[in-house]
Image (cartoon, helix red, strand yellow):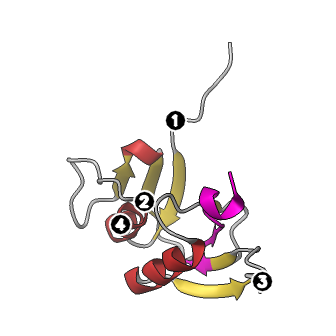
């Protein structure tokens, strides 16, 4: 027998608020049972479960998400995510169009935005 990953769980100060941010990023709805103030919130289609924990984030993430835009360029996606409340942490984009951008969500969890498949020539 083997196991499968059911959810990737992300600790947060406010599970619902952070899940709502990520729901906008991914264009996926929160679970219908989730409401502001709930200690857990789920983006079922993405397998992301957000849970409220009492301790604050204190160090760099050991695991992070790499996003690949589906209907826009990397730079357009970075601009959209900044408007949603992300913060640019490290800009690894190069003049030749390669590279990525490291952003953080509203609670400081780092994630990367890579080039789209079209930009990669896939």
Q: How many marks?
A: 4
User: Marks 4 and 1, Cα distance to the nearest angstrom?
Assistant: 21 Å
The residue beneath circle 2 is: 26
Query: Is residue 39 in view?
Result: yes
Residue 107 visible from this viewpoint: no
Spot occupied by residue 109 in the image (x, y as percentages of width and height): 58, 73
**Could you say which is closer to the camera, residue 107 or residue 44?**
44
Residue 53: x %, y % from top left: 47, 65
Q: Which residue is mark 4?
A: 24
Which mark is nearer the camera, 2 or 3? 3
Q: Tell me the CA gap for discs 4 and 2.
A: 5 Å
Nearer mark to the viewer, of 3 and 1: 3
- Magenta residues? 103-122
Disc 2 secondary structure class: helix
Q: Secondary structure at mark 4?
A: helix
Q: Name the mark on residue 6.
A: 1
Q: Residue at x 70, y 60 (%)?
A: 120
Do labels 4 and 2 touch, CB within 8 Å?
Answer: yes
Residue 71 circle label:
none
What residue sits 58% from the left and 72% below the top?
A: 74
Q: How far apart are the two marked residues, 2 and 3, measured between alpha carbons?
A: 25 Å
Image point (58%, 35%), residue name: 5
57 versus 25 height, above or below: below
Q: Closer to the observer: label 4 or label 1?
A: 4
Q: Which residue was labeled with disc 3? A: 94
Question: CA–CA distance between discs 1 and 2?
Answer: 18 Å
> Residue 61: x, y in percent?
68, 68
Report the residue at 44% width, 51% height from top.
49
Which is nearer the N-term, disc 4 or disc 1? 1
Nearest to N terminus: mark 3 or mark 1: 1
Quarter the N terminus occupies: top right
Between the C-alphas of marks 3 and 1, the distance is 36 Å
């Amino acid at each position: 027998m083997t196991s499968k990953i059911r959810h990737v769980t992300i600790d947060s100060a406010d599970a619902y608020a952070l899940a709502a941010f990520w729901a906008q990023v991914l264009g996926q709805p929160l679970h219908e049972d989730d409401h502001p103030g709930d200690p857990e919130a789920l983006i079922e289609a993405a397998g992301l479960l957000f849970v409220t924990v009492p301790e604050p984030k204190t160090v760099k993430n050991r695991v992070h998400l790499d996003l690949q835009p589906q209907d826009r360029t990397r730079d357009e996606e970075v601009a959209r995510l900044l408007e949603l409340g992300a913060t640019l942490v490290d800009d690894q984009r190069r003049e030749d169009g390669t590279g990525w951008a490291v952003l953080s969500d509203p609670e400081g969890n780092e994630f990367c935005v890579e080039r789209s498949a079209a930009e990669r020539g896939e």
